[in-house]
Image (cartoon, rainbow, N blue to C red):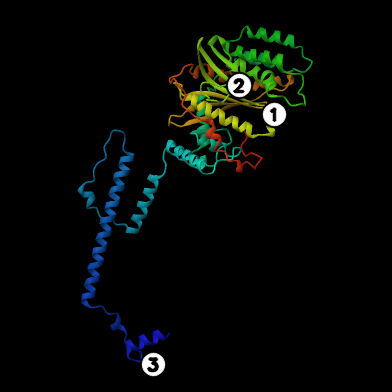
Amino acid sequence: MRKFKRVYKDSTKANYKSKIIPDLSPLFTQSELQKSTMKNGARVLNEAINITTKKTHTKIEIVAASITAPAGSTTPSPSPSNESYVWSSSSSRDFNDTSLVSSSLSAPSTTKAKLNKYIEICKDKANKHGFNLQTEIHQVLASKGIILLKKGQSCSELVRYIDAESLLNNIQSDAINRNIKVDTRIYLELATLLRDINDRTDRQALKFELNKLYEIATKEDGMIIEMFVNLVTKLPNFQRLSPVGEMELTVNFLDPILTHIFHCPDSNKHLVWLNRQDDNTTVCRPDATMVALPQKAENVTLGYVEVKSLDAQSDPELAFMDLVRLGTFSRSLMLRKPNRKVLVIQCVGYTMIFYLVSEHSDGFIQMVEILTIDVLKEITEIGGLLQKIDDLKRLFLLYEHQLEPRYINVRAPEDDLTSTMETINPKRRKRRIPSFSLV
């Protein structure tokens, strides 16, 4: 207030309490020199803004033309008429448009670029603080360059970049031919024979009827009939309450199904339950391998199997580690194959999950769930497998025709599973209920 009184008094040569209203207009009147200077300054500023705006839009047009131009075409250079073009919009709007175009050009636009971005994020996370194996299994595999796609279970980080469900459906439709089905007559005969099976069924008579049906079946349909004959031989009358160990689970419940799909000696393809080191698994030991034997001294791996019994549920991380092992094994094997395809199977208790590991056209590695089957626990459940026999026939033909029985690389690329397991952070294992279901 004191400052106001002083300035007012100095400007008007009068006291501010005086009732006489002084004329203050001379204080705000510009001289001719001031007016000329302001006018010239405004003109120079407008010219500078127009020149900057024109240059910015010219650069944007060149970049946009180079992106949208078809292959082999050249980007035209700006003409003099473009340089002299006067933009009517305001400078603020022009610069806002420029920032929007720049951000859209810098964002990942292709599927390959988006997935590479996702993989880089997972690798960075692995280097910084690691993963929770039971809740971040997708990101554990992505840190090794493997995109896991499973029905109804997508990584929340991955769906920010791509439509995972759509990608999964497309890969499944390419890998599995839905037009392939078991012969209708064979299907109806099987349904008639298996519909009333119980613990008092004469198994020998049933196998006799199945063998008669086998005589009129094709090779692929005959594989299905052989599988049912083996199940009739192996399955118990009822499910016992005591836990089934891994070896018994393998021999009596899993093998009767897997053998008839993947063990084809007439094609020199074998399912080998070995639990020993393979050429492509460094020091690790898968529970089983599918191999082709072109010659006596040569074997080519086609896929892997990992098994965990139900009594392993006390430590659920073991089954999650199996999935990481399968992904790591198959990645090394896939890179040696001409068509970049490998089949792996994870068995968790009485559930079998089949994954096709392959290389996408955009260059990334995908591990895709193509089929899940609940294994039979007793003889009375045998009829329930009928709804899956079309899928089993499709799986057999995929194995027969799409898995290459030869290598193109002499040695498998080094891929140390130990380094992958080191990304699992022990401090993040406290959560016992996994958010991801293996089955």
- Whether residue 408 is visible to the viewer of this picture, yes or no, is yes
Name the amino acid type tagged 3.
Answer: Lys
Name the amino acid type tagged 1.
Answer: Leu
Relative image position of residue 261 (x, y in whole percent): 59, 17
Of 166 and 378, which appears nearest the observer? 378
- Count of labels shown? 3
Left or right side of 381 for 145? left
Q: Residue at x 67, y 18 (%)?
A: 251
- The label nearer to you, 2 versus 3, is 2
Residue that label 1 marks: 310
Question: In the rendered structure, which disc, 1 or 3, sits on the residue that comes first in sequence?
Answer: 3
The correct choice, above or below, for 13 with respect to 181 in the image is: below
Element type where label 3 sits in the image: loop
Badge 1: few (under 14), some or many (20 or more) residues near its Cα, within 10 Å? Answer: some
Element type where label 2 sits in the image: loop
Question: In the rendered structure, which disc, 2 or 3, sits on the residue that comes first in sequence?
Answer: 3
